[in-house]
Amino acid sequence: MNHFPTLLASELRQIDCPGNQGARLASEDDFGVLDLVNAEVVADAGGESVFMRQREDFFSLIIDAGGAISLISEDDVPVGYSVAVPAGGGVPAFREAVESVGVVFGTAIRPGFRGRGWQRRMIKARRNALLEHGCERLQAVCAPENHRSLSNLVSMGFQVVAHLGEVHGSPRFLTEFRPAGSSRLDQSSEVDAAVTLPPGGLLAEHESRLLSGKRGVRFVSGPEPALVYSQAELQLGVE
């Protein structure tokens, strides 16, 4: 029996948010609404450079594979959603379809309802549910120019581990979360200077570090957002 949706539902009930906001598991009856939310988010981004187009058949595939979709509402109006699935359930992970990998898709929030902290809440809820389900590591992809999402993932313990090349015509980073067995940063660890992210920086600078086995372990905010790389896998403090 698949317990992941039940575990996620429990995490959603524990989310601390204003009384007029909340999240619950989406059902098949919600697929049409999810499709419309996704279309609005993709259109606002000017195409699939940041967020891929997801239609009703995609949401059906996720449920059939044992995954779960969280529907986010404000004043009883659907404003966003997020998707997660244990890879072994039938949806391939970004590297390998094995039971030990949990896949975290992006959180889609309609324009006008952003900045409420829902992406971080959804990362945390799905991370906790997937780990409790038995996944030993989690993966998510993110466009290098999607600085807000990349910052949220890294702040929640994910590390940039690879450049996947182009997906829907736009480059994507692979990020990964490992809950245990990681070394901590110490004075002997080799840490690079911050490497500026696109569009201000060159993607090739990041790719060369990733190909050498380094990981993006820290996000640096500012006029030119950047990633700090380390040869060691770091287990930083996360929520």
Image (spheres, rainbow, N blue to C red):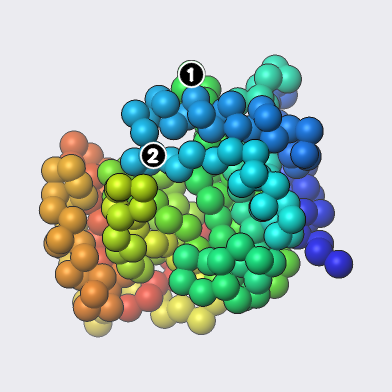
Q: Residue at x 77, y 39 (%)?
A: 28
In the image, taking residue 87 as reference, residue 211 lies left or right, namely left
Q: Nearer the viewer, residue 79 or 218?
A: 79
Residue 165 % position (x, y) = 29, 60
| Residue 18, visible in the rendered structure | no
- 127 up-or-down from 178: above or below: above
Q: Secondary structure at mark 1?
A: loop
Q: Which residue is mark 2?
A: 48
Q: Are marks 2 and 1 in contact (CB under 8 Å)?
A: no
Question: Residue 22's quadrant in the figure?
Answer: top right
Q: Residue at x 73, y 20 (%)?
A: 76
Number of other residues with Cα within 10 Å of mark 1, as a class: few under 14, some 14 to 19, many 20 or more? few
| Residue 30, visible in the rendered structure | yes
Question: Residue 187's quadrant in the figure?
Answer: bottom left
- Residue type, numbered disc 1: Gly
Q: Which residue is mark 1?
A: 112
- Residue type, numbered disc 2: Glu
* Disc number for residue 204: none
Task: Specify which label sits upstream in the sequence, 2 or 1.
Answer: 2
- Quarter holding the C terminus? bottom right
In the image, taking residue 234 as reference, residue 12 lies left or right, namely right
Q: Nearer the viewer, residue 120 or 104?
A: 104
Residue 152 % position (x, y) = 43, 47
Question: Residue 230's quadrant in the figure?
Answer: bottom left
Number of other residues with Cα within 10 Å of mark 2, as a class: few under 14, some 14 to 19, many 20 or more? some
Q: Residue at x 36, y 53 (%)?
A: 167
Residue 142 % position (x, y) = 39, 51
- 166 up-or-down from 30: above or below: below
Q: From the viewer's perspective, is the residue at label 2 or at label 1 nearer?
A: 2
